[in-house]
Amino acid sequence: MKILLLTDQNAFLGAGHMQRMLSLRDYLNDCGFATALASSADGTGDVELFIRDMRDSSVDEIRVLQKTAPVVVIDDHGSGRAAADKVIDLLPHPSHRDDDMYYHPEAFLYGYEFCKSIESSTGSLNKDIAFVMYAGAEADDETINFLLAAAPEELSGVMLANKRHIKIQNGKYAGDFNRAYAGIVLSANVLVSHFGITMYEAALGGASVIAINPSEYHNALAQSASELNIVYNALREASAPLVVSEIIRREALAYRREADLALIREKIISNMENFIKLIVF
Protein backbone atom coordinates (compact mmCIF):
# COMPACT_ATOMS: atom_id res chain seq x y z
CA MET A 1 0.00 0.00 0.00
CA LYS A 2 1.22 3.49 -0.89
CA ILE A 3 0.65 5.90 1.98
CA LEU A 4 1.23 9.64 2.07
CA LEU A 5 1.61 11.30 5.45
CA LEU A 6 0.55 14.94 5.35
CA THR A 7 1.96 17.21 8.04
CA ASP A 8 4.10 20.27 8.62
CA GLN A 9 6.09 22.10 11.28
CA ASN A 10 5.43 25.75 12.04
CA ALA A 11 4.39 28.13 14.80
CA PHE A 12 0.74 26.97 14.56
CA LEU A 13 1.37 23.22 14.48
CA GLY A 14 4.53 23.05 16.59
CA ALA A 15 7.22 20.40 16.12
CA GLY A 16 5.39 17.39 17.56
CA HIS A 17 3.27 16.62 14.50
CA MET A 18 6.32 16.39 12.24
CA GLN A 19 8.26 14.37 14.81
CA ARG A 20 5.59 11.70 15.20
CA MET A 21 4.95 11.43 11.45
CA LEU A 22 8.67 10.93 10.81
CA SER A 23 8.59 8.06 13.32
CA LEU A 24 5.49 6.61 11.69
CA ARG A 25 6.98 6.89 8.19
CA ASP A 26 10.04 4.86 9.16
CA TYR A 27 8.02 2.22 10.98
CA LEU A 28 5.50 1.80 8.16
CA ASN A 29 8.31 1.42 5.64
CA ASP A 30 9.96 -1.20 7.87
CA CYS A 31 6.63 -3.06 7.83
CA GLY A 32 6.53 -3.14 4.02
CA PHE A 33 4.36 -0.10 3.26
CA ALA A 34 5.53 2.43 0.67
CA THR A 35 5.30 5.55 2.79
CA ALA A 36 6.30 9.14 2.09
CA LEU A 37 5.87 12.40 4.00
CA ALA A 38 4.88 15.78 2.54
CA SER A 39 3.20 19.05 3.45
CA SER A 40 0.76 18.85 0.50
CA ALA A 41 -0.74 16.23 -1.82
CA ASP A 42 0.30 17.98 -5.05
CA GLY A 43 1.44 15.56 -7.75
CA THR A 44 0.71 12.36 -5.80
CA GLY A 45 -1.91 10.62 -7.93
CA ASP A 46 -0.89 7.04 -7.09
CA VAL A 47 -1.48 7.31 -3.33
CA GLU A 48 -3.74 4.64 -1.82
CA LEU A 49 -4.18 6.21 1.63
CA PHE A 50 -3.69 9.68 3.10
CA ILE A 51 -2.89 10.14 6.79
CA ARG A 52 -3.39 13.81 7.60
CA ASP A 53 -1.82 15.17 10.79
CA MET A 54 -2.35 18.93 10.42
CA ARG A 55 -5.27 19.85 12.73
CA ASP A 56 -8.48 21.71 11.94
CA SER A 57 -9.19 20.59 8.38
CA SER A 58 -12.04 21.94 6.28
CA VAL A 59 -14.55 19.73 4.48
CA ASP A 60 -13.18 20.95 1.13
CA GLU A 61 -9.65 19.92 2.06
CA ILE A 62 -10.77 16.39 2.89
CA ARG A 63 -12.98 16.08 -0.21
CA VAL A 64 -10.10 17.06 -2.50
CA LEU A 65 -7.92 14.31 -1.03
CA GLN A 66 -10.72 11.75 -1.27
CA LYS A 67 -10.78 12.14 -5.05
CA THR A 68 -7.52 10.17 -4.94
CA ALA A 69 -7.71 7.94 -1.85
CA PRO A 70 -9.33 7.46 1.58
CA VAL A 71 -8.30 9.91 4.29
CA VAL A 72 -7.38 9.24 7.91
CA VAL A 73 -7.21 12.35 10.11
CA ILE A 74 -5.27 12.54 13.38
CA ASP A 75 -6.21 14.89 16.22
CA ASP A 76 -8.28 16.92 13.77
CA HIS A 77 -11.14 18.88 15.30
CA GLY A 78 -11.95 20.99 12.26
CA SER A 79 -15.11 20.73 10.16
CA GLY A 80 -13.40 18.17 7.90
CA ARG A 81 -13.25 15.65 10.74
CA ALA A 82 -16.78 14.41 10.02
CA ALA A 83 -15.99 13.99 6.31
CA ALA A 84 -12.86 11.87 6.80
CA ASP A 85 -12.93 8.13 6.19
CA LYS A 86 -11.40 7.45 9.61
CA VAL A 87 -10.77 9.61 12.67
CA ILE A 88 -7.99 8.85 15.15
CA ASP A 89 -7.32 10.97 18.22
CA LEU A 90 -3.98 10.26 19.88
CA LEU A 91 -4.09 13.26 22.21
CA PRO A 92 -6.73 13.91 24.87
CA HIS A 93 -9.33 16.56 24.14
CA PRO A 94 -12.15 18.09 26.20
CA SER A 95 -14.69 16.63 23.74
CA HIS A 96 -13.72 13.11 24.85
CA ARG A 97 -15.60 13.62 28.09
CA ASP A 98 -18.79 13.20 26.07
CA ASP A 99 -17.54 10.91 23.29
CA ASP A 100 -14.22 9.05 23.41
CA MET A 101 -14.88 6.48 20.69
CA TYR A 102 -12.11 7.97 18.51
CA TYR A 103 -9.57 8.36 21.31
CA HIS A 104 -6.73 5.81 21.11
CA PRO A 105 -4.00 6.52 23.66
CA GLU A 106 -2.77 2.95 23.15
CA ALA A 107 -1.60 4.06 19.69
CA PHE A 108 0.17 7.27 20.79
CA LEU A 109 3.14 8.01 18.52
CA TYR A 110 6.42 9.22 19.99
CA GLY A 111 8.79 11.57 18.20
CA TYR A 112 11.43 10.61 15.66
CA GLU A 113 14.35 12.20 17.48
CA PHE A 114 13.29 10.58 20.74
CA CYS A 115 12.89 7.12 19.22
CA LYS A 116 16.11 7.23 17.22
CA SER A 117 18.27 8.31 20.13
CA ILE A 118 17.33 5.23 22.22
CA GLU A 119 17.06 2.77 19.33
CA SER A 120 20.18 0.82 20.29
CA SER A 121 20.48 1.84 23.96
CA THR A 122 20.43 -0.79 26.69
CA GLY A 123 20.06 -0.93 30.45
CA SER A 124 18.60 1.92 32.45
CA LEU A 125 19.16 5.63 32.89
CA ASN A 126 19.79 7.28 36.22
CA LYS A 127 17.52 10.27 36.73
CA ASP A 128 20.44 12.64 37.31
CA ILE A 129 18.89 15.88 35.95
CA ALA A 130 16.82 17.78 38.48
CA PHE A 131 14.69 19.54 35.87
CA VAL A 132 14.37 19.94 32.11
CA MET A 133 12.66 22.96 30.55
CA TYR A 134 11.29 22.66 27.02
CA ALA A 135 10.90 26.10 25.46
CA GLY A 136 10.21 24.89 21.91
CA ALA A 137 11.93 24.40 18.56
CA GLU A 138 11.19 28.04 17.77
CA ALA A 139 11.26 29.51 21.26
CA ASP A 140 10.66 33.23 21.80
CA ASP A 141 12.48 35.37 24.35
CA GLU A 142 9.40 35.73 26.54
CA THR A 143 9.13 31.96 27.02
CA ILE A 144 12.86 31.52 27.66
CA ASN A 145 12.99 34.38 30.15
CA PHE A 146 9.98 33.03 32.07
CA LEU A 147 11.53 29.57 32.33
CA LEU A 148 14.92 30.88 33.43
CA ALA A 149 13.23 32.97 36.10
CA ALA A 150 11.51 29.78 37.35
CA ALA A 151 14.74 27.74 37.57
CA PRO A 152 15.71 27.07 41.22
CA GLU A 153 19.20 28.48 41.66
CA GLU A 154 20.43 25.62 43.84
CA LEU A 155 19.48 22.94 41.26
CA SER A 156 21.08 22.10 37.91
CA GLY A 157 18.91 21.55 34.87
CA VAL A 158 18.73 21.66 31.10
CA MET A 159 16.92 23.98 28.69
CA LEU A 160 15.73 22.61 25.34
CA ALA A 161 15.29 25.65 23.11
CA ASN A 162 15.73 26.40 19.41
CA LYS A 163 17.21 22.94 18.79
CA ARG A 164 19.91 23.43 21.44
CA HIS A 165 20.52 21.57 24.72
CA ILE A 166 21.78 24.09 27.28
CA LYS A 167 22.85 23.64 30.90
CA ILE A 168 21.15 25.77 33.54
CA GLN A 169 23.09 26.54 36.72
CA ASN A 170 22.31 29.26 39.24
CA GLY A 171 19.28 30.18 37.12
CA LYS A 172 21.45 31.03 34.11
CA TYR A 173 22.74 29.42 30.92
CA ALA A 174 25.99 27.53 31.54
CA GLY A 175 27.01 26.16 28.12
CA ASP A 176 25.85 23.31 25.92
CA PHE A 177 24.77 20.00 27.45
CA ASN A 178 26.21 17.12 25.46
CA ARG A 179 23.58 14.40 25.68
CA ALA A 180 21.04 13.09 23.16
CA TYR A 181 17.47 14.37 23.43
CA ALA A 182 15.92 11.15 24.75
CA GLY A 183 18.67 10.77 27.32
CA ILE A 184 17.87 14.24 28.59
CA VAL A 185 14.09 13.93 28.94
CA LEU A 186 14.25 10.40 30.35
CA SER A 187 16.82 11.47 32.95
CA ALA A 188 14.67 14.37 34.16
CA ASN A 189 13.03 14.30 37.57
CA VAL A 190 10.83 17.21 36.46
CA LEU A 191 9.80 18.46 33.03
CA VAL A 192 8.51 21.99 32.50
CA SER A 193 6.86 22.40 29.11
CA HIS A 194 3.77 23.52 27.27
CA PHE A 195 1.39 20.69 26.39
CA GLY A 196 2.83 18.48 23.67
CA ILE A 197 4.72 15.34 22.74
CA THR A 198 7.69 16.13 25.00
CA MET A 199 5.46 15.64 28.05
CA TYR A 200 4.61 12.11 26.95
CA GLU A 201 8.23 11.28 26.28
CA ALA A 202 9.38 12.55 29.69
CA ALA A 203 6.49 10.70 31.35
CA LEU A 204 7.87 7.42 29.98
CA GLY A 205 10.85 8.01 32.24
CA GLY A 206 8.64 8.80 35.21
CA ALA A 207 9.14 12.56 35.31
CA SER A 208 6.79 14.86 37.16
CA VAL A 209 5.30 17.26 34.62
CA ILE A 210 4.66 20.97 34.98
CA ALA A 211 2.54 22.45 32.17
CA ILE A 212 3.02 26.15 31.45
CA ASN A 213 0.84 26.80 28.43
CA PRO A 214 0.83 29.66 25.89
CA SER A 215 -2.89 29.39 25.07
CA GLU A 216 -6.27 28.25 26.37
CA TYR A 217 -6.17 25.49 23.74
CA HIS A 218 -2.97 23.97 25.17
CA ASN A 219 -4.31 24.47 28.70
CA ALA A 220 -7.51 22.56 27.94
CA LEU A 221 -5.58 19.66 26.40
CA ALA A 222 -3.30 19.43 29.43
CA GLN A 223 -6.32 19.42 31.75
CA SER A 224 -7.66 16.44 29.79
CA ALA A 225 -4.39 14.45 29.97
CA SER A 226 -5.15 12.37 33.06
CA GLU A 227 -2.61 9.75 31.93
CA LEU A 228 0.28 12.18 32.51
CA ASN A 229 1.76 13.01 35.88
CA ILE A 230 0.94 16.73 35.57
CA VAL A 231 1.45 18.26 39.00
CA TYR A 232 0.77 21.87 37.94
CA ASN A 233 -1.08 23.20 34.90
CA ALA A 234 -1.61 26.88 34.11
CA LEU A 235 -1.48 29.54 31.45
CA ARG A 236 1.90 31.25 31.33
CA GLU A 237 0.27 34.67 31.65
CA ALA A 238 -1.39 33.52 34.88
CA SER A 239 1.73 31.89 36.34
CA ALA A 240 4.40 33.33 38.62
CA PRO A 241 8.00 32.10 38.18
CA LEU A 242 8.45 31.86 41.95
CA VAL A 243 5.45 29.52 42.24
CA VAL A 244 6.75 27.31 39.43
CA SER A 245 10.23 27.33 40.99
CA GLU A 246 8.88 26.05 44.30
CA ILE A 247 7.01 23.20 42.56
CA ILE A 248 10.15 22.23 40.62
CA ARG A 249 12.13 22.20 43.85
CA ARG A 250 9.55 20.03 45.63
CA GLU A 251 9.15 17.51 42.81
CA ALA A 252 12.86 17.27 41.95
CA LEU A 253 13.75 16.34 45.51
CA ALA A 254 10.87 13.92 46.05
CA TYR A 255 10.62 11.93 42.83
CA ARG A 256 13.54 9.78 41.63
CA ARG A 257 13.85 6.43 39.91
CA GLU A 258 15.61 4.85 36.95
CA ALA A 259 14.21 4.78 33.41
CA ASP A 260 14.18 1.26 31.94
CA LEU A 261 15.13 1.62 28.27
CA ALA A 262 13.98 -1.87 27.24
CA LEU A 263 10.47 -1.27 28.60
CA ILE A 264 10.37 2.15 26.94
CA ARG A 265 11.26 0.68 23.54
CA GLU A 266 8.62 -2.02 23.99
CA LYS A 267 6.04 0.68 24.65
CA ILE A 268 7.05 2.64 21.54
CA ILE A 269 6.81 -0.43 19.29
CA SER A 270 3.56 -1.67 20.83
CA ASN A 271 1.95 1.71 20.17
CA MET A 272 3.12 1.66 16.55
CA GLU A 273 1.60 -1.78 16.10
CA ASN A 274 -1.67 -0.58 17.59
CA PHE A 275 -1.69 2.39 15.21
CA ILE A 276 -1.28 0.17 12.15
CA LYS A 277 -4.30 -1.88 13.27
CA LEU A 278 -6.34 1.32 13.29
CA ILE A 279 -5.50 2.34 9.71
CA VAL A 280 -6.18 -1.03 8.06
CA PHE A 281 -9.51 -0.70 6.24
Image (spheres, helix red, strand yellow):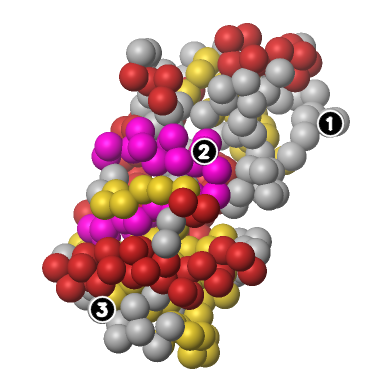
In the image, taking residue 186 as reference, residue 221 lies left or right, namely: right
Is residue 180 among what the camera can see? no
| Pair 2/3: label in front | 2
Looking at the image, residue 178 lies above or below residue 239: below
Q: Which type of secondary structure does the marked residue at label 1 adopt?
A: loop
First in sequence: mark 2 vs mark 3: 3
Between 37 and 52, the one nearer to me in the picture: 52
- Which residue is labeled 1 in the image? 42
Gap between marks 3 and 1 measured at Cα: 47 Å
Residue 216 located left or right of residue 100: right
Q: Please provide percent x and percent y for residue 118.
A: 38, 64
Quadrant in the picture for residue 254: bottom left
Q: Are marks 2 and 3 in contact (CB under 8 Å)?
A: no
Indicate the position of residue 228 as horizontal and vertical percent values.
Answer: 29, 45
Give residue 13's position: percent from left, percent from top: 63, 43
Labelled pair 1, 2 in contact (Cβ < 8 Å): no
Rounded to the nearest whole Å, what is the CA distance between mark 1 and mark 2? 34 Å
Q: Which residue is mark 3?
A: 128
Q: Secondary structure at mark 3?
A: loop
Q: Are marks 3 and 1 in contact (CB under 8 Å)?
A: no
Nearer the observer: mark 1 or 2; the answer is 2
Q: Nearer the viewer, mark 3 or mark 1?
A: 3
Residue 113 appears anywhere in the view = yes
Say the numbered circle drawn on residue 216. Answer: 2
Task: Tell me which amino acid carries mark 3.
Answer: Asp
Question: Which quarter of the figure has residue 156?
Answer: bottom left
**Which residue is rendered at x = 20% and y = 68% of the image?**
250
Q: Secondary structure at mark 2?
A: helix
Chain part drawn in magenta:
200-227
Residue under the image location 38 percent in, 20 percent down:
96
| Amino acid tagged 2 | Glu
Query: Counting residues from the N terminus, which is met first, the one under dot 3 or under dot 1?
Result: 1
